[in-house]
Amino acid sequence: MTAWLIVGLGNPGPAYSGHRHNVGAMVVQELAVRTGASLRSHRARAAAAEVRLPAASGGTGLGPAPGPRAIIAAPLTFMNESGGPVAGLLSFYKVPVQNLIVIHDDLDIPFAEVRLKLGGGEGGHNGLRSITKSVGTRDYLRVRVGIGRPPGRMDPADYVLHDFSSTERSEVPLLISDAADAVERLVGQGLVAAQQEWHSR
């Protein structure tokens, strides 16, 4: 069975860990916790782990079957250089680009909402732009984690490099959990079924 590559985008190091731009990496950490995995440094300049995601409910009566094999990863480069690690992981694990899922922050989606899509533009997101250039296509799956628009005239580039506000912070764990759930549904049930569930909320 072909594996999946699930990449959460962010910037490396503790100074960036709580920033809005790092929600993708936060979701990968949540997936690591759920699967009991430890992300380890990989030669593709990423922290990665091979895991088994939860199996889609099949009702066979034979107990839980092992779920799909996946590599969960976060690049160890800065956001605008995300493409190199992603291309390196695809090559190392022999994962086709149609099995690539990129989890990223999205300014155009209200805070705490999650959306899924295949392909499309990068919306000014430097991480997506780098990945598209490195893998040679825009046709990869995205889990878009809503962070909302900046207040007033605040520059979006500054906004994404700030921590969540005090009012948002209480909702962040639920948002991360929701996005991790969306990744599991996407892998287990396919894009259309996952979109029907998440886009109707």
Image: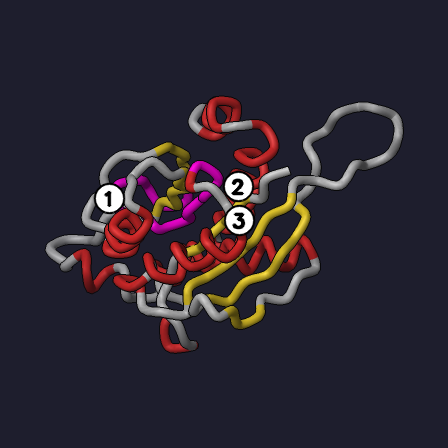
Dot in front, 1 or 3: 1
Start-end of magenta stretch: 98-114
Q: Position of residue 190 (x, y in %)?
A: 53, 28
**Separation of disc 3 and disc 2 at Cα?**
14 Å
Asked whether, in this view, residue 115 is left or right of residue 185, the answer is: left
Q: Residues within 10 Å of mark 2 (few under 14, many from 20)?
A: many
Residue 112 in the magenta stretch? The answer is yes
Going from the N terminus, do you reach mark 3 or mark 2 first? 3
Residue assigned mark 3: 174
Front one among 169 and 34: 34
Q: Of the residues shown, which amino acid type is indicated by label 3? A: Leu
Residue assigned mark 2: 183
**Separation of disc 2 and disc 1 at Cα?**
19 Å
Q: Give the residue drawn at x 48%, y 28%.
A: 191
Q: Residue 25 appears in which quarter of the rendering?
A: bottom left
Residue assigned mark 1: 122
Q: Give the residue drawn at x 26%, y 62%.
A: 80
For the residue labelled by badge 2, is the local secondary structure a helix, a strand or a loop? Answer: helix
